[in-house]
Amino acid sequence: MYGKGLRALSIATVAAIALALALVFFFAPLDADQGFVQKIFYLHVPLAITALAGFMVGAVHAIRHLRSGDRSHDARSYVSIHTSIIFGVGVLITGSIWAKASWGHWWVWDEPTLVSFLIVFLLYATYYPFRYAIEDPERQARYASVFAVTAGAFVPLNFLAVRLAESLVHPRVFATAEGGMPPKMWLTFVVSLAGIALLWVTLVKFELTAKSASAHLSRLRRALEPA
Amino acid sequence: MPALPLDEAGKYVAGAYVVFVVLILIYVAIMAAKLQRLERELRELAGFAEQRSGRRDSREATRETPNRDPEVTAVAEEMRR
């Protein structure tokens, strides 16, 4: 059931990412301050936004699971968080590479944006041991949903705190008094964000389809095998 | 820090994009392994189901062998009613 539209979604994702890459390397102007290194921005920032939004999606599904008791919402919440953690790994690695190229250090501990993202990432990294420490499936799903809601509420709070904090080296390119990026950069960024967001949706759908097929197979095995 | 020259910056940009591609490839490889496992299980179950239906067919065939003549079968049906 989850596999419906997966093929079209995959094609759209590949097309969007190909277009984004073409815009990044052949259309977007070079940054006056950072030069070619700024191209990492079109990968790093969409990954970060999508990962954080994915954690929020996980929280929304967790709320729906707690309200309805429907286990499919728990599966959606789990897969959303799982995919966002993978994207989070991408954010941390690409961010470190960009930091090394721009600031000369792989990591800057007194920079609120970096440290806050690391805290959110580590918080969600505890989701797996927390979830699988509980054996009873019903309790496991319920407790994991409570965790997802609590951690999900932490994401916008964290984002707000970072925006309010004074940044030392990490740039603020959105909603600045100077107007932020030029239109060509904006367009490239929006297409990159769309491509990465589509990739997230595709991977979530892909994994849900695999999980659903696996569950159906287990049911079939139980039905076919002699008691 | 001043902007890095293109040859220096290119390594970092390539590194970042390669990391992204590698992550996606690892994910796809893990999903492919899962898919293979599902396929194997499905094949096993299909074989099991075929075996079971084969056993049932042979049981039914054995029961019906003496009554292959349609007339005899009809009489047997009638008697069963």
Image (spheres, rainbow, N blue to C red):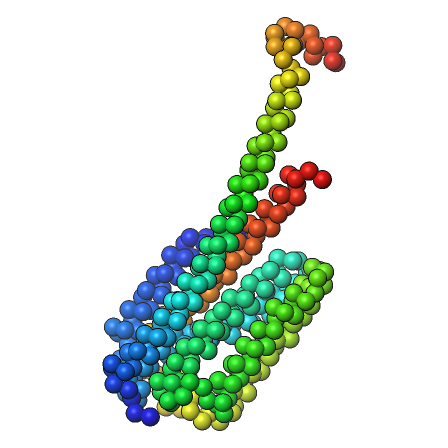
Whether residue A183 is visible here, answered yes or no, is no
* Quarter that holds the N terminus of chain B: bottom left
Q: Quadrant of residue B80?
A: top right
* Quarter that holds the C terminus of chain B: top right
Q: Quadrant of residue A44?
A: bottom left
Relative to A110, B81 lies left or right: right
**Residue at (69% x, 12% y) in the render:** B77
Toward the viewer: A129 or A182? A129
Relative to A94, A139 lies left or right: right
Relative to B73, A108 lies left or right: left
Q: Position of residue A193 (x, y in %)?
A: 40, 71
Relative to A8, A216 lies left or right: right
Toward the viewer: B46 or A191? B46
Classify A136 as above or below B13: above
Q: Position of residue A225 (x, y in %)?
A: 66, 39
Whether residue A213 is visible here, answered yes or no, is yes
Toward the viewer: A143 or A153? A143
Toward the viewer: A58 or A36? A36
**Residue at (62% x, 31% y) in the render:** B52
Q: Position of residue A95 (x, y in %)?
A: 42, 80
Q: Residue furthest top?
A: B71
Q: Quadrant of residue B20?
A: bottom left
Q: How many marks?
A: 0
**Residue at (49% x, 74% y) in the render:** A88
Q: Position of residue B29 (x, y in %)?
A: 44, 58
**Residue at (57% x, 50% y) in the render:** A214
